[in-house]
Image (spheres, helix red, strand yellow):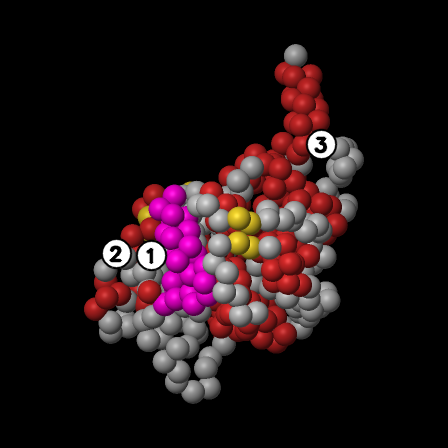
């Protein structure tokens, strides 16, 4: 681990470092914790905090005010990380006020669901894209295969760029996804078409003259210089491709996100199952596994997206406000009635 990640300078720096180490030891991804504690560390320095034995409600609220211009959901989750750290301080003998969390709110962003025609246009534009000049950090090689993999499997961009060669099991038609949002390893299915795309990409990837690329721990998706891909650069290129084929979408401060491919993949998978005659609600368990969700309730959101995008296809017989347990019970009763 890079030591700079623990380079805190406030009076609480020793506690921040030990907290992150314990957090990592429990098997959690410390990235967000490091980020939140870094902002808190910087705030403590800005107010010339010297008392390393207590955190008052005033200090907490002062830090929280700096998040007022952020999405309410983001503000809530960052506050939740800090409150856990404050509880940690209390358990280690510090006198701290444990604050209430802000209202979690509801995200206002509405994902863009691409049509099948738009997905095809993006793929073609990606295949035709050529850099005007040679760039060592070019993503030209990876984009066609990467975007197709995101759409084919529904995995997250962060999960995709962290795939290592040892995780690619094309003989078993799957990819092992290790670094997941929920810290739960899973398998992403790879169909024959996607497998052939990856084989072509890997053949070209292996032409890059860097000996480390032949190791099992090397990244699957790499730039022209053989280094790991940058999600931010991929997003910019993706937005440029969408603009090139005439797909424009703005909601508040947000534009098209590469994460919208994941939403689209799930909705299209749901529509395919509905067209085959399956009940929308009975598709949720399969979709939950496909998307790598922690529970099936998280997948219910895609029923709403599917109905918004394909109202003529997805006819939901249950009100969207009913509980998930009621949905499952009704689905089970329907199944039993059909089998009696």
Q: Which residue is mark 1?
A: 164
Q: Nearer the viewer, residue 149 or 103?
A: 103
Residue 34 appears in the figure = no
Q: Residue at x 65, y 22 (%)?
A: 332
Mark 3, residue position: 323
Place residue 110 in its image quadrant.
bottom right
Position in image of residue 162 (x %, y %): 39, 58
Residue pictured at 77% horizontal, 45% vertical: 312
Tell me, for residue 233, which label it has, or none: none
**Residue named by callout 2:** 216
Is 288 left, or right, of 91 in this rendering? right
> In this rendering, which labeled residue sits more in front, label 1 or label 3?
3
Separation (CA) of disc 1 from disc 2: 7 Å
| Residue stretch rendered in magenta on the structure | 4-26
Residue 113 is one of the magenta-drawn residues: no
**Can residue 244 be seen by looking at this rendering?**
yes
Do callouts 1 and 2 mark residues in contact (Cβ within 8 Å)?
Answer: yes
Asked if residue 12 lies in the magenta stretch, the reply is: yes
The local secondary structure at tag 1 comes to loop
């Amino acid at each position: 681990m890079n030591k700079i990640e623990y380079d805190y300078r406030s009076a609480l720096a020793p506690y921040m470092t030990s907290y992150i180490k314990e957090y990592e030891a429990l098997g959690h991804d410390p990235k967000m914790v490091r980020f939140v504690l870094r902002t808190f560390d910087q705030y403590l320095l800005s107010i010339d905090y010297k008392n390393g034995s207590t955190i008052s409600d005033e200090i907490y609220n002062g830090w929280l005010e700096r998040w007022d211009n952020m999405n309410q959901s983001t503000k809530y989750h960052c506050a939740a990380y800090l409150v856990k750290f404050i509880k940690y301080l209390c358990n280690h003998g510090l006198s701290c006020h444990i604050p209430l969390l802000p209202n979690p709110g509801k995200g206002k962003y509405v994902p863009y669901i691409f049509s099948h025609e738009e997905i095809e246009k993006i793929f073609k534009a990606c295949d035709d894209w050529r850099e005007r000049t040679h760039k060592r950090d070019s993503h030209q090689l990876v984009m066609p295969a990467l975007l197709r993999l995101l759409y084919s499997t529904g995995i997250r961009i962060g999960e995709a760029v962290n795939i290592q060669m040892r995780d690619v099991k094309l003989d078993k038609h799957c990819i092992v996804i290790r670094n997941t949002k929920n810290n739960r390893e899973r398998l992403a299915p790879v169909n024959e078409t996607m497998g052939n795309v990856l084989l072509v990409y890997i053949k070209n990837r292996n032409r890059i003259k860097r000996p480390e690329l032949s190791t099992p721990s090397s990244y699957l998706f790499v730039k022209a210089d053989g280094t790991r891909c940058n999600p931010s650069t991929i997003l910019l290129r993706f937005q440029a491709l969408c603009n090139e084929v005439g797909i424009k979408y703005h909601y508040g401060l947000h534009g098209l996100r590469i994460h919208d491919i994941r939403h689209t993949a799930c909705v299209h998978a749901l529509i395919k199952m509905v067209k085959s005659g399956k009940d929308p609600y009975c598709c949720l368990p399969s979709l939950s596994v496909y998307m790598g969700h922690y529970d099936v309730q998280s997948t219910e959101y895609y029923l709403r997206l599917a109905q918004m995008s394909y109202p003529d296809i997805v006819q939901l017989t249950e009100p969207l406000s009913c509980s998930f347990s009621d949905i499952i019970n009704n689905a089970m009763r329907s199944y039993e009635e059909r089998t009696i």
